[in-house]
């Protein structure tokens, strides 16, 4: 028998992960990020830039905006500074000349992570990139050098939450 969200075997759990978007604006992507944030137990979603939260976003989010803590910020840099003071490591999900494959990242017990994802076309802007501790990327093996922001975020959150659950003490 196929299970649904009322009778699945999954247990609710929150991880010390704050997901920040840098000017992600397409309603389907924003709605999808709410769903992914809920699915992977993200502590908070911070939407950077200007984005109108409308019916298209809520249709895609499938009511997860009611359970995912979120806020909107124009400029992410002050928020990143505050998260750093609170002990978060600031990680960008971006392919750069110095980014590391996300699968190879080592995490500490109860590591707090602020994961920044970039805009659909241009990625994370340069000013925000400079504020981060490091960048990681999802390894890809085809000819394309990028994937949809929600797909990449899904892979990243799956990897990070599994690493946080399986940290050796």
Image: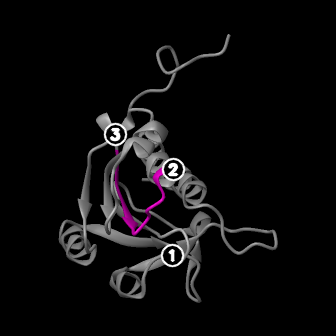
Quarter of the image for residue 137 reads: bottom right
Name the one closer to the observer, 94 or 112: 94
Q: Which residue is mark 2?
A: 28
Side (left or right) of 159 relative to 38: right
Element type where label 1 sits in the image: loop
Q: CA distance from mark 3 to mark 2?
A: 13 Å
In the displayed structure, 70 sits above or below 104; it is above
- Whether residue 99 appears in magenta in the rendering, the answer is no
Name the one closer to the observer, 100 or 29: 29
Element type where label 3 sits in the image: helix
Name the one closer to the observer, 74 or 138: 74
Q: Which residue is mark 3?
A: 65
**Can you give x and y, in whole percent of width and height, for residue 75 in the image?**
26, 75
Q: CA distance from mark 1 to mark 2?
A: 17 Å
Residue at 42% over, 87% down? 126
Characterize the local packing of mark 2: few (<14), some (14-19) or many (20 or more) Cα atoms within 10 angstroms.
Answer: some
**Can you give x and y, in whole percent of width and height, for residue 156 in the image?**
54, 58
Looking at the rendering, the stretch of residues picked out in magenta corresponds to: 15-28
In the displayed structure, 93 sits above or below 57; it is below
């Amino acid at each position: 028998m196929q299970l649904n969200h009322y009778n699945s075997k999954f247990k609710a759990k929150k991880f010390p992960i704050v997901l920040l978007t840098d000017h992600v604006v397409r309603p389907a992507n924003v709605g999808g990020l709410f769903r992914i944030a809920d699915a992977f137990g993200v502590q908070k979603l911070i939407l950077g830039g200007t984005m109108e939260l409308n019916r298209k976003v809520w249709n895609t989010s499938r009511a997860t905006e009611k359970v995912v803590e979120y806020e909107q910020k124009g400029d992410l840099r002050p928020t990143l500074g505050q998260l750093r003071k609170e002990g978060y490591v600031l990680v960008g999900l971006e392919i750069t000349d110095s980014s590391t494959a996300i699968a190879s990242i080592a995490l500490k017990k109860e590591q707090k992570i602020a994961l920044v994802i970039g805009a659909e076309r241009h990625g994370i802007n340069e000013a925000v990139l400079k504020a981060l501790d490091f960048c990681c990327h999802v390894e890809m093996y085809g000819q394309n050098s990028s994937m949809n922001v929600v797909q990449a975020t899904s892979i990243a959150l799956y990897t990070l939450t599994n690493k946080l659950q399986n940290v050796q003490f």
